[in-house]
Amino acid sequence: MAAIFASTVKELKILSRDRGTLIRLFLLPVMFITVMSLALGRMYRRPGESMLKLPVIVEDVSAPAQELVQALRAVQGLEIETVARGEALARVKDGKRVAALLVPAGFGQALAQNSPVTVTLYLDPGQTLATSALGAAVRGALARTQGEAMRQRGVDGLLFPVEQAVAQLPPEARARFDLKGTRAVALARSREATAEPIASLRTETLGSTRDKPPGVYEQNVPGYSVMFMFFIVSYVANSIVTEKRNGTLRRLMMAPVSKAELLLGKVVPNFIVGLVQAGVLFTIGHFVFGMNLGHDPLGLIVISMAVAGAATGLGILVAALARTEEQVSGLSTLLILTLAALGGSMVPLFVMPDFMQTAARITPHAWALLAYQKLIVAGGSTRDVLPHLAVLSGFAATFFAVAVWRFRFE
Amino acid sequence: MAEIIAISRLVKRYGDHPAVQDVSLSIEEGEIFGLLGPNGAGKTTLLSVMSTLLRPTSGTVTVAGFDTQREAERIKGICGFVPQELALYPTLSARDNLVFFGRIYGLRGRRLRERVAHALEAVGLQDRAGDVIDTFSGGMKRRVNLAAALVHEPRILFLDEPTVGVDPQSRNHIFETVERLSQEGTTVLYTTHYMEEAERLCDRVAIMDQGQILALGTPADLVATQGGGFIEVGLRETGEGIVERMNDIPAIRSALLSDHTLSLRSRGTNAALAPLINALSAGGAVVGSLSILEPNLETVFLSLTGKHLRD
């Protein structure tokens, strides 16, 4: 018993000093829970929670227009925002809203006169599921508004005035009026009015300013390729720290080679490994999973080179910052998984909320994925990914610069 | 013989800790020069400064006429360094390791192949050239460690404790290799805390402790200064005025009492023994052990520092 206790205390003490393991056991799961929840939060909304925001452009001031908005507000899971036309359409085009509804001027009058009128639902083409549900909700609200108008036309417009007029007559005169026929006519009118909707819903798909969202392999092949190209970080950093520990680095320092040559001797092979990795994974993606490779292989190559450069640079940086092999493994695991989760390797960027998509831009992963998708989903050319290439090269250059500045050969 | 390494008033400090204090030294071309001292004496630091890995805090070191600070690149090309640790790639073969280090020193093609084969032969491992380092015994790894510094045919070879943890066979191999290199004209700097190694291998030895050189000369000269050998007495009780009593004995040159150990330099252990025992009993000392050490580099060190090399 005492031995078990002693051993437990000792093990916990050793573990408490092993930062790499502590990071993996505690910090990483917290990171995953946070990033994944923020990225995927929308998928897990419960009914009753506001799910969809629908901008409504109300260009008619009549009572029926207001009734339609009220009817829409009553739909569960729908949040109505009344905004101007330009603003509403811009939100849809930017991908911030899945659709916008236009209630045109003259809507109320048309209903009153039983003349046809069209309500327009502007749709984001990428959001078919959400928009079909939305279409049903709008049709329901429209029918209710129209039904109300018809009821008024039939009952209020014919039956009530007649009944009132009859009620004014002396009792003996009233007996001579049988209102059955009038009631039947009013009812028939109402029926006829609701049977043939005069207010119809038209849908119009808006050309989105966003890129088309990727398919499953177009997301996963580049996503996981980039994630695993960054695993070289751990390998590079470890190999440097090992060379420091076993003395080979010291031995090399005594040879007539410069420090720059020594570091480049680490960079070049791992850079090549990264390129081979990208080549193998994209080839498998294409031939095994049928992933489209776009029209510009050069674009794929230069982006992959920049990714491999950034990954290798980060590896050297980790080696410069960490002193022991434990620190290397802790720090590199943390970086590899956090950057991948945040950067869109695990969860597609387009399903993330806006602020997460913005935050993702601090990772090389996000830039790499946007570039790959521009090439293989949107069919872009090298010219289209030059900004991404510049940012990725910037990441690589920054990693190298800080690494060289912080690197200690001893 | 010509001077190949000149060290003048060298000081190397790590923060406040002085690792090497005011050392001046001249090393001749072609000699095997030993730095003998316990761990932490400053041997490795001195070697690292000579091989340009460390910059001196003050003082100058020139190697083959080049200044270690201003002309390090020139020096690096003509020096070979065998570090204390096994500075090899354990998952590569012996040959792959040597080829890599050869290329780092600018060797190519046929010359590289020849030099690698030669270095493997020099340490007697040509039969295991293709085997992975991880599969080697400690002694064989040490031999590859040495071979890796020989591929580029250095004029000066630095060996830092090259026999630590080595079986006798590999140790002999290393000794023979060093002796052969010396015969071929290579200058060898050899640090060790084994006095037997220094005695066997070195033309001259500098005895170091706490960053300073305490004595310098051929092993024979250094031993000769000790004359008649050393007696060490372990005391249970020291008695009274024991050191004075010892100094009164003509056959004893000096006496040193530290803790319960009495260290005596004699003019001849036989002549000193009888009066020593008399004086001990007269002084009321209780003796736990008494040993006679024949004069060698160990006793030189003992008499200079009052410590053993391997304390």
Image (tube, rainbow, N blue to C red):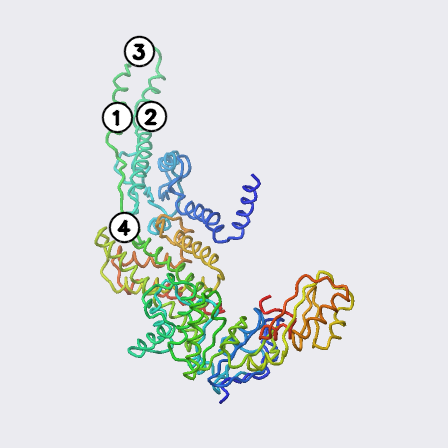
Q: Which residue is drawn at the image coordinates 48% and 87% (left, top)?
A: B65
Gap in angstroms between the C-alphas marked 1 and 4: 53 Å
According to the picture, the residue beneath numbered tag 2 turns out to be A156
Gap in angstroms between the C-alphas marked 3 and 1: 28 Å
What is the three-letter code of the residue carrying label 3?
Ala
Q: Which residue is drawn at the image coordinates 66% and 65% (left, top)?
A: B290
According to the picture, the residue beneath numbered tag 4 turns out to be A217
Query: In the image, are marks 1 and 4 on the same chain?
Result: yes
Compared to residue A278, the image places residue B63 above or below, namely below
Query: In the image, are marks 2 and 1 on the same chain?
Result: yes
Mark 3 or mark 1: name the one nearer the start of the chain. 3
Badge 1: few (under 14), some or many (20 or more) residues near its Cα, within 10 Å? some
Mark 1 vs mark 4: give the one in front: 4
Gap in angstroms between the C-alphas marked 4 and 3: 80 Å
Mark 1 or mark 4: name the one nearer the start of the chain. 1
Chain letter of disc 1?
Answer: A
Marker disc for residue A191: 1
Chain letter of disc 3?
Answer: A
Query: For the residue labelled by badge 1, is the local secondary structure a helix, a strand or a loop?
Result: helix
Gap in angstroms between the C-alphas marked 2 and 1: 14 Å
Q: Looking at this view, is B228 or A179 the one in front?
A: B228
Query: In the image, are marks 4 and 3 on the same chain?
Result: yes
What is the three-letter code of the residue carrying label 1?
Arg
Q: Visible in this render: residue A314? A: no
According to the picture, the residue beneath numbered tag 3 turns out to be A175
What is the three-letter code of the residue carrying label 2?
Asp
